[in-house]
């Protein structure tokens, strides 16, 4: 068994696609119309056949909005992505206008930072030491 796809709930798929590709550096894998929304996935350019991230519209279920708001209010990231160097990635992303709720912090075996994805989520980036 392996993970092939995971999701992040987004308030606007077009805005999410722009953020996740232009800022975070993912590449679009699938973009299939499904009525009012799209089956829209991105992948890491380092592993284009790897795990896909579905940019899933949060309007499909009434609990999605309150769930996301509660996570943000408590400072809890919705997802976590690995990077080679959190410190360098924070500086790169800040240069692109990305806002962070937690700058890079050394937590022993891992360095973490938390950013706002502009689509209603906090995302944590990590580097394992």
Image: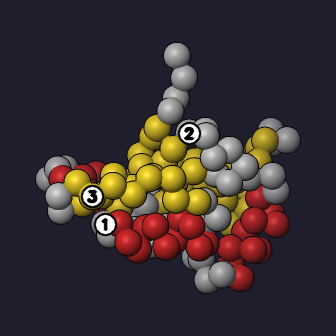
Residue depicted at 66% across the width and 59% down the height: 113
Question: Sequence-wise, which precedes: disc 1 or disc 3?
Answer: 1
Compared across the picture, whether 109 is left or right of 78 comes to right
Residue depicted at 54% across the width and 23% down the height: 2
117 relative to 35, above or below: below
Real-space CA distance between mark 1 and mark 3, rounded to the nearest whole angstrom: 17 Å
- To which residue does mark 3 refer? 33
Colour mapping used in the image? secondary structure
Asked if disc 1 and disc 3 are in contact, CB closer than 8 Å, the reply is no
Q: Position of residue 8 (x, y in %)?
A: 41, 51
Q: Position of residue 37 (x, y in %)?
A: 24, 60
**Which one is in front, 54 or 31?**
31
| Residue 96 showing in the rendered view | yes
87 relative to 5, above or below: below
Q: Quadrant of residue 105?
A: bottom right
Question: Sequence-wise, which precedes: disc 3 or disc 2?
Answer: 3
Secondary structure, mark 1, is: loop
Q: Position of residue 40 (x, y in %)?
A: 39, 55
105 relative to 50, above or below: below
Residue 81's tag is none
Real-space CA distance between mark 2 and mark 1, rounded to the nearest whole angstrom: 22 Å
- To which residue does mark 2 refer? 51
Asked if disc 2 and disc 1 are in contact, CB closer than 8 Å, the reply is no
Q: Nearer the viewer, mark 3 or mark 2?
A: 3
Q: Quadrant of residue 100?
A: bottom right
Asked if disc 3 and disc 2 are in contact, CB closer than 8 Å, the reply is no
Secondary structure, mark 2, is: loop
Residue 11's tag is 1
Question: Sequence-wise, which precedes: disc 2 or disc 1?
Answer: 1
Compared across the picture, whether 85 is left or right of 39 comes to right
| Residue 73 showing in the rendered view | no
């Amino acid at each position: 068994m392996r993970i092939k796809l995971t999701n992040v709930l987004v308030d606007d798929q077009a805005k999410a696609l722009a953020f996740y590709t232009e800022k975070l550096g993912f590449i679009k894998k699938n973009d299939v119309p499904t009525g009012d929304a799209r089956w829209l996935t991105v992948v890491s350019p380092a592993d284009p056949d790897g795990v896909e991230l579905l940019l899933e519209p949060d309007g499909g279920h009434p609990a999605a909005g309150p769930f996301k708001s509660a996570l943000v209010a408590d400072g809890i990231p919705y997802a976590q992505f690995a990077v080679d160097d959190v410190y360098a990635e924070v500086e790169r992303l800040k240069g692109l206008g990305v806002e962070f709720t937690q700058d890079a912090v050394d937590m022993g075996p891992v360095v973490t930072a938390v950013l706002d994805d502009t689509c209603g989520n906090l995302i944590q980036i990590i580097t394992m030491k």
